[in-house]
Image (spheres, helix red, strand yellow):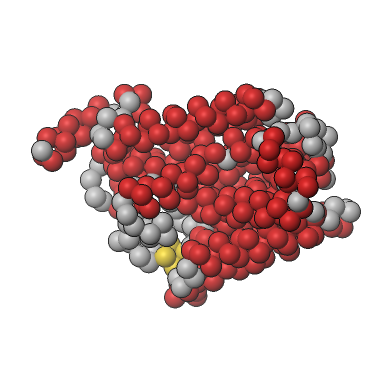
Amino acid sequence: MSIGLFFGALLAALLVAVAIIRSTHLHAHLSMDGDLSGPQKFHVVPTPRVGGVPIMAGLTLSASIAWYLGLRELAYLLLAGLPVFLAGLTEDLTKRVRPLYRLLFAFVSAAMAVWLLDAKLSWIGLPGMDAALHSLPCLAVLVTVFAVGGVCHAINIIDGYNGLMGGVAMVITGALAFVSFAVGDMDLLAISLALLGAVLGFFVWNFPRGMIFAGDAGAYLVGFLLAEVSVLLVVRHPGVVSPWFPMLLMIYPVFETIFSIYRKKFVRQMSPGMPDGLHFHMLIYKRLVRWMVGKREAKHLLRRNSLTAPYLWAVALFSVMPATLFWQYQWALQLCCGLFVLMYIWLYRRIVQFRAPRWLVLHRAAKADRRKLVASSH
């Protein structure tokens, strides 16, 4: 069943995505991201940003097949995910839904998952907090809703370059599928593979050419499902799967979000909801990739955009690989979380100061250009 759900989601997402791309002239006034000048805009031609539609289409087909075969959880998850998906899609079509409202709808979706699937965390691996969660079910619901909503927003935060969100999401989903198989949870394995297939069907058209973007609907939906599968894995296998496993698994987008809030609120004295150009993936582009390829011709800009994602896939693997290896060992997961945070802060400081480690620079010309830029700034 799992393989069938994977290929069903893959095929549906592929076909719906290409249908959207080929029919752009019919819906461009609604679906196009034509803003090429914003601080978080790095594409060179107007592009449809409704990639969440093919992802949802792939998952819906898989949910229908799964329902017929007796697996109800995927359909319930998609039903719970509808509020955040529709809020994201409304933003993609109108560009008028504020980040706060999208986050609130993510909380609504998380609350619906608690109601439909009893997906609430009763332990998080912290002794004092675990006792409170056991004795206060309402607190457990609040913590779960906040955590799921935060992951939704975090996945949306890193959706900045061709293939970035999709690649990170597939790596995380593969790890969730592996651990689901390891603990014998075939239902969560099937859901994970369905999500993997749907994201892959979108990814084919998103990377490297950026023919369609995930948009808020796609990023929030994928984030919601990653969070919920993680919660269900911990809830269904208490004492076996550590709650620090999903924490380490998704620490790159989660810590990127936390660090961005800190940077904007306390360092730059601006609203955390305001966009800026200092996210980690943007610094990778501006400090490293932008100096490697050509000039400002469209084909060179597109190539620079696509070269950014592999750097961040590597960053994500620094957390996903140890999480997959040590998913049972809480102390090791906590240690790796701490090490990742230190590595992230060290890399961020080095790159923002034009002192990126040599192993990150793939072309000698890039180093020369950076020296010229530093010299001209003094």
At which x and y percent is residue 44? 34, 57
Up-down: is 270 above or below 254? below
Q: Residue at x 26, y 35 (%)?
A: 353
At which x and y percent is residue 202? 57, 53
Q: How many marks?
A: 0
Q: Quadrant of residue 376?
A: top left
Viewer-proximal residue among 354 and 29:
354
At which x and y percent is residue 264? 36, 52
Q: Quick one: which residue is furthest to the right in this view?
A: 70
Q: Residue at x 68, y 38 (%)?
A: 128
What is the quadrant of the N terminus in the image? top right
Viewer-proximal residue among 31 and 226:
226
Viewer-proximal residue among 147 and 358:
147
Decide if residue 303 is on the left or right side of residue 378: right
Q: Quadrant of residue 327?
A: top right
> Can residue 23 be seen at all in this image of the molecule?
no
Q: Residue at x 10, y 38 (%)?
A: 378
> Can residue 328 be seen at all in this image of the molecule?
yes
Up-down: is 2 above or below 150? above
Up-down: is 212 above or below 124? below
Up-down: is 38 above or below 23? above
At which x and y percent is residue 15? 62, 58
Viewer-proximal residue among 52 and 139:
139
Q: Residue at x 32, y 54 (%)?
A: 269
